[in-house]
Image (spheres, grey):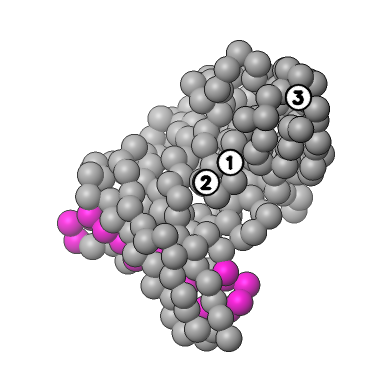
Amino acid sequence: GAGVSQSPRYKVAKRGQDVALRCDPISGHVSLFWYQQALGQGPEFLTYFQNEAQLDKSGLPSDRFFAERPEGSVSTLKIQRTQQEDSAVYLCASSLDTGSVSYEQYFGPGTRLTVT
Amino acid sequence: DAKTTQPPSMDCAEGRAANLPCNHSTISGNEYVYWYRQIHSQGPQYIIHGLKNNETNEMASLIITEDRKSSTLILPHATLRDTAVYYCIVRSPTGGGNKLTFGTGTQLKVEL
């Protein structure tokens, strides 16, 4: 079946521009996660949705980062007024997690954001 | 979640077994050991997980010591396509929505 897809795969933004990154999770997966991966580092958690509810946004680095999942399926990560330090790969993952059990996460290929 | 320690890099000859170690001395009783890998320019891929018994699937085997303070991921016949960064993660399966806390992992290089 189809896996997690992300678009665009690559994005170049000038400093100060706003960007929107899209994630299409696996159909039927209740939970959706966003991670940020800097060059040479492991992914770092940004935020978590259960259906349309954003239950954890403790990893968002600043108020310039905003994520939404209005209908409980597709999610968008928005970064306002991009800065050079926002350059990274942004990974989306989905899982069958319920409110009480965590399952393995399935990752998309990521969006590589370069801020110039 | 408990912290894990892995060697930064390892080499393995194609066709031989790759044994990747992980220390997790502060693991608590309800935490599982998960392994993911990340091939260059791809997202992480789930491999296997376990609590205290050894586990095997079509990709790998997981050996967890009796005291649960360390584990080893075994790729029985490594191929060039197994070249990747391997992450050992300790995580509780209860509570839902538990994020994965990645370290820097082990870069496995499989060579001819």
Instruction: Using the image, name the chain to which the residue with label 1 belongs.
Output: A
In the rendered image, residue B10, in percent from the top left (x then y), is placed at 44, 70
Task: Indicate which disc residue A6 carries.
Answer: none
**As drawn, B92 above or below B57:** above
Inspect the image, locate mark 3, and give the three-letter code of the amino acid beneath it.
Arg
Inspect the image, locate mark 2, and give the three-letter code of the amino acid beneath it.
Gln
Range of magenta residues: B66-83
Would you say residue B71 sits in the magenta stretch?
yes
Q: From mark 3 to mark 1, how far is it between C-alphas?
A: 17 Å
Task: Indicate which disc residue A41 carries.
Answer: 2
Inspect the image, locate mark 1, and give the three-letter code of the amino acid beneath it.
Ala
Of residues B95 and A59, the one nearer the viewer is A59
**What residue is rendered at 65% in x and 38% in y?**
A88
Of residues A7 and A25, the one nearer the viewer is A7
Whether residue B53 is visible, yes or no, is no
Circles 2 and 1 on the same subunit: yes
Q: How many marks?
A: 3
- Provide the secondary structure element on which disc 1 rests: loop
To which residue does mark 3 refer? A15
Of residues A48 and A16, the one nearer the viewer is A16
In the rendered image, residue B46, in percent from the top left (x then y), is placed at 54, 54
